[in-house]
Image: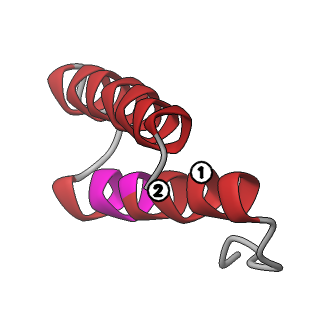
Amino acid sequence: MTDEVRQAASDARAVVEVAAKAWLRHGTVSAGEALDVTLDAYALALTEMFGLGWQPYT
């Protein structure tokens, strides 16, 4: 894994963690929904980094 990819993954993880914590704190989503958002964000970040054809589940 290159430093650029490692940094992009770290940045994506930080954004997702902050968003999930804020949503949970304000009671607008459940823990399960926050996990779904987190997993979708990770998958989307990987898609962007590696050019995969993944689409979020809707």
Tell me if mark 1 has few (under 14), some (14-19) or many (20+) residues whose alpha carbon lies within 10 angstroms of its own.
some
Where disc 1 sits, the SS reads: helix
* Quadrant of res 44: bottom right
Secondary structure mostly taken by the magenta-highlighted segment of the chain: helix
Residue to which mark 1 is pinned: 45
Residue to which mark 2 is pinned: 42
Query: Toward the viewer: 33 or 17?
Result: 17
Please tell me whether residue 13 belongs to the stretch shown in magenta: no
Q: What segment is highlighted magenta in the picture?
A: 33-38
3 to 55, vertically: above or below: above
Residue 22: x, y in percent? 28, 20
Badge 1 amino acid: Ala
Residue shown at the point (83%, 79%) measured from the top left: 53
55 to 5, vertically: above or below: below
46 to 14, vertically: above or below: below
Residue 20: x, y in percent? 30, 35
Residue shown at the point (51%, 34%) measured from the top left: 8
Badge 2 amino acid: Tyr
Where disc 2 sits, the SS reads: helix
**Is there CB contact under 8 Å for labels 1 and 2?**
yes
What quarter of the picture does the C terminus occupy? bottom right
- Horizontal side of residue 47 vs 15, given as left or right: right
